[in-house]
Amino acid sequence: MNVYDSEQIVTSLKPLGYKITSSLEKAGLIIVNTCAIREKAEQKVFSFLGRLSRLKIKKPDLILGVGGCVAQQEGSKMLQRVPFLDLVFGTHAICRLPGHIKRIETKKCRIVDTEMIDGIDESAFVIDTEDHRKVSSFVTIMQGCDNFCTYCVVPYVRGREASREPEKIVNEIRELVNCGVKEVTLLGQNVNSYGRKEGLCSFAELLSLVNGIEGLVRIRFTTSHPKDLSDDLIYAFYMLEKLCHHIHLPVQSGSNSVLKRMNRKYTRELYLEKINKLRNICPDIAVTSDFIVGFPGETEDDFKQTLDLIKTVEFDGLFAFKYSDRPNAPASGFSHKISEREKKDRLMELLDLQERFTKKRNESLVGSTELTLVEGKSKKQSGKDAQIEPRHIQWTGRTSTNKIINFSRSDDCIACDDIFTGRMVNIKVEKALSHSLMGRPIEVEPIFDELVKGQIHQVSGAKC
Ligand code: 5AD
Ligand code: SF4
């Protein structure tokens, strides 16, 4: 979500003449987009702002702004704490950013804008129609959250849940496809409750509409709340050929007593039932999750149940975090806090356990052929192209199951282009590394129309 917001910030400032630079020293304007989800993320903001103060001393005309969740949370307190800041703007203020920057440029004033609105302000969604390099794009379908998990700051910094109208979403995706986008990731704090409040269509129906967009090849979404994962949505993995076979389904804990105190509104048993349904409908689906360790009052036995859940599900991957108190979140007032030492030990134990399953699931793909959307040259190699022969260039893409796969042009390749970016390529998986796969391209889709019409598996591509 923050990546998406940062893109919106960049796009909205283009008409003012601003362009991205990779050098902090060259910048005339620096916007720090912030995250407040955990204490560590917030601490990083203040240490980074400390570094920026040295730049401002050297270059007094430099404009410095802070946006996002920390800005929303701290508001004008940030101006006091960071004396050289020109602008603090919250999560609902991106659409007003160009106006604020113009005022600061001319009037040399300091501005705080943390106003929040109910509902959706469509002017907040701008797309850069001049950018034709993107293969994959985020699309916000809803904002805010009404779930109030007791550890979470999101409802307080992103406001109440509100969904965009399906027509607006579909139109935005059509425009993106016209700019060359092949894959969209639909974004919301809990996409499973899309449209419910406003009486719009369900999320499964929205997916079906998006699936019908000509020229679009793949659909992903994030994030899902297990309590709202409907049978219709599970069935969509079978019905919709463009829907990628991956679901991120944060469970947070394997213990019912912890889940209850987290206000998650589902049990371990219900979670496992949903995973079974997903795997019955879509046997190769990749499942990833989020976990919090050391929630207040989490006992050794609670933690064992979390480890047991991980062994039962065998996730493709997971993110795990040490619990941290967040302002306004009820759990910050809960007793029986777990020590940092204990949280660290539990985190290591959990990650060690999962490492086995991540590896196992990656290894199970060796020998298979994975239809991959190529995102571009692998990061390691961009910038060094001049010295690299085309056949040695390493490309990177993602499988439908969201695994990163790297490959080079095969030695005897006669038909495939040197340019793979944005194309669907069948890749034979040859090696599994801990967090990615390596493979060999065997087929490039030459007839894109057929792909787009959903005949992905029947297209006879050019052989390499
Ligand atoms: N402490 C630790 N982790 C947290 N998360 C959210 N709030 C907290 C917190 N207070 C984690 C959850 C969530 C992910 C985005 O961040 O696992 O799914
Ligand atoms: Fe936070 Fe819970 Fe909302 Fe997710 S569903 S954003 S964890 S309150």
Image (tube, rainbow, N blue to C red):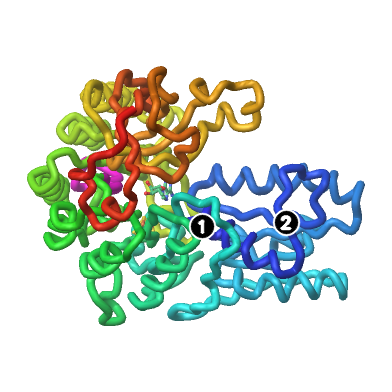
Q: Measuring 73% from the left and 56% from the top, which residue is drawn there?
A: 19
Q: Measuring 13% from the left and 57% from the top, which residue is drawn there?
A: 235
Q: Work out whether 377 lies above or below 236.
A: above
Q: Is residue 255 magenta?
A: yes
Residue 181 image offset from top left, x and y in percent: 44, 56
Looking at the rendered structure, the kind of residue marked 2 is Lys
- Residue bearing mark 2: 19
Within 10 angstroms of label 1, few (less than 14), some, or many (20 or more) residues?
few
| Magenta stretch bounds | 246-257
Q: Is residue 360 magenta?
A: no
Please report whichever mark, 1 or 2, sits nearer to the chain's N-terminal start: 1
Q: In which quadrant of the rendered image does the C terminus lie?
A: top left
> In the image shown, does 232 or 47 lie closer to the viewer?
232
Q: Is residue 83 visible?
A: no
- Residue bearing mark 1: 4
Residue 397 image offset from top left, x and y in percent: 41, 37
Give how far apart the Cα atoms at labels 1 and 2 are: 17 Å
301 relative to 110 in the view: left or right: left
Q: Does the CB distance between marks 1 and 2 fall below 8 Å?
A: no
406 relative to 20 in the view: left or right: left
Quick one: SS at disc 1?
helix
341 relative to 381 in the view: left or right: left
